[in-house]
Image: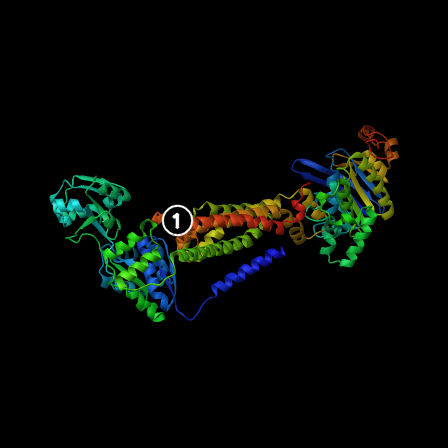
Amino acid sequence: MVISLNEVSKTYGAKQVLARATLHVRKGQCLSLVGPSGCGKSTLLRVVLGLVVPDAGTVLVGGAHVGPDTAQAVRLRTGYVIQDGGLFPHLTARGNIVLVSERLGWGSVRIAERVAELFELAGLSPDLALRYPAELSGGQRQRVGIMRALMLDPDVLLMDEPLGALDPILRARMQRDLKALFLRLEKTVLLVTHDMNEAAFVADSIAIMRQGCVVQEGTFEELVRHPADAFVAEFIAAQGLSRTGSGAGA
Amino acid sequence: MKRFVSIVAVLTVLLAIRSAQASDVPKVTIGSKAFPESWVLGEAMAELARPAALVEHRRNLGGTEVVWTALSSGRVDAYVEYTGTIAEVILKSETPLDLVTLRARLAARGVGVSEPLGFNDGYAIAVTRAFSERLGLRAISDLAHHPEVRAVFTHEFLGRKDGYPGLVARYGLDLRDVHGIQHELAYEALASGQADATEIYTTDPQIERLGLTLLEDDRNFFTRYEAVILYREDLRERAPSAFAAMMRLTGAIDERRMLRANALVAGGAESPERAAAWLLQDALGQERVGPSPARVALRAIAMATLRHLELVFVSLLAAVSVGVPLGILATRSRTLATLTLTTAGLFQTIPSLALLAFLIPVLGIGVGPALVALFLYGLLPIVRNTYAGLTGIAPALAEAAEALGLSFRARLFYVAIPLASPTIMAGIKTSAVITVGTATLAALVGAGGLGDAILEGIALRDTTRILEGAVPAAALALAVEWGFGQLDRLVVPRGLRLSD
């Protein structure tokens, strides 16, 4: 197991965000975390990075416990992508991508080679390297965000609604590109989305969350054929049943 | 950023060069209080000492407390004081003291007292010349026979033991028509014949202008305020020729000369320098070949502006180097935030004059307390904006920085501070503009700058003099505004100036 979350709970004031959530992601697997908004899926992702410290339960990444002392090391081995890329507006595309490697003392040749590789991988023109986020399109920003996450060649990629800010057509294309990328890189991926179709298209396996708890995990077919309860059945039914791409009908 | 650092470096070097311009010539610092007579006498002393020493004349050292503190602490070497004031304010004596007693008491504090300059600047009773001739008035005792005399006195004079109540007791006066009035209005009342008598200072230029007669204090009621030079004992050995030159003023200035010199300055007709030159020429026959008044004024304005810039630059630099780290520190805990922001805010609520007054006993007079006060005033906008800028960063970006695995230091210097830089710069700019304005008050503690001209202009009702300070100050504020616009381009990352 690359990521192991065991009975993780987290309460903010009176609100329980995670309730004994358990989730395991195998090496090379692409698991999608799906559920209605407020079900705790983003919080679960943050727990993996140590950005949220759980009240109870254990978190292991690559066999190591994630705690205050180890979080930094885990973050360096984990790529994290958020909606709209989460780029720093004061840095250029390249500045965003190389920020951490520069702080880690990488040589300029090594950085240049890796950046060239990433632009090729992301299908983005290197001419955009010196543009600021405000000068990039939404899709370009997202690709730069992914390049930033991949810069250190992490084993694990965590994505929180990475395509949430894109229009439907662009979103469908990005979904295809993401899927191709995952196949090529063989990373372990944990992808949070509220879109069942996106999850079905991109991921190998889907975990459905409800009220801080993982209620069922399986392939899309398994979930459709044998929903664990009425909620799962309803959640799948409400989103339509296409397996070819975005729920927007593309 | 590099360019900004180099600008700071160049300015620092320039200031260092300026302050290092010392030489073997003894340094003599003359002080004066914040009124025209004191400036003229201070300037006269400075002028006499100039051939023999590197002389600095610090004007407007507030009232007696300030300039005396300056003298006793060695920041000023000499200034003109009045015997009555020495007894009353400095030695806290209930009764007037003679010169011998004053000398003995001050010698214990390392301060010498010169022979009197020759005039008394005390209270006197003035009547119009026509009135005195008509009634044959010569001395105050004559008033006792004329209860019909209409008198106007300031409220202070009416209330003081050594004012009207004492005067009535000593001379057995029984005036029926006595009114309290504002000092300036008393002149008008006498000039227009609404009143016959008032109290006046013996060297008031209005005596000459309105043609007033001073009634002789034939029963020696009024305390004598003989002008004397107070000097530090060590000055005699340290700068013997300068000391001797200044002592030429003793016995050389009578009431008439002093009030003529005062009349020259009143209304801003002449600068204190010109009045001092006239006084020296009239009293000592000393010809002065000074530069033309226009050049003096321009040079003075330039010097004052430079001093003003020094005050602003140094205090701002200090406020930035303390304020930004404080603002960063405040983001680390809620308690710390409340503590720093409240403390910085507290300084801002203290009126600037009061803050300066608090600082004088601790830091004395001059540039020191002015810098501290300006620094404390400049702190709040910088701390507050640094804190607001850092806490106002989009949570998603702050989290992204953390998720990337950047250390706290790296997040601060490569993400948080650049993102907050527009807000931080705005705080520094606010602080700079406030400091340019507040620095005019630095003149009150003898720190110089453009405030000197403004204070003197107000005291003399001389609009030109006020403008000599106010116009450069306003220009400086505009320059600061413009300068920060330029600085923004250097400091704030380009990416933050692009609109989405």
Q: Amino acid at mark 1?
A: Thr
Q: Residues within 10 Å of mark 1 (few under 14, many from 20)?
A: some
How is the structure coloured here? rainbow
Instruction: For the C terminus of chain B, give its image quadrant.
Output: top right
Element type where label 1 sits in the image: helix
Describe residue B364's horizontal placement relative to residue B227 as left or right: right
Spot occupied by residue A246 in the image (x, y as percentages of width and height): 82, 34
Q: Quadrant of residue B143?
A: top left
Residue to which mark 1 is pinned: B464
Q: Between residues B125 and B353, which one lies in front from this camera angle? A: B125
Spot occupied by residue B21 in the image (x, y as percentages of width and height): 46, 66
Q: Is residue A6 visible?
A: no
Spot occupied by residue A61 in the image (x, y as percentages of width and height): 78, 48
Spot occupied by residue A65 in the image (x, y as percentages of width and height): 75, 50
Q: Is residue B453 visible?
A: yes
Describe residue B262's horizontal placement relative to residue A148 as left or right: left
Location of residue B178 with respect to A104 vertically, above or below? above
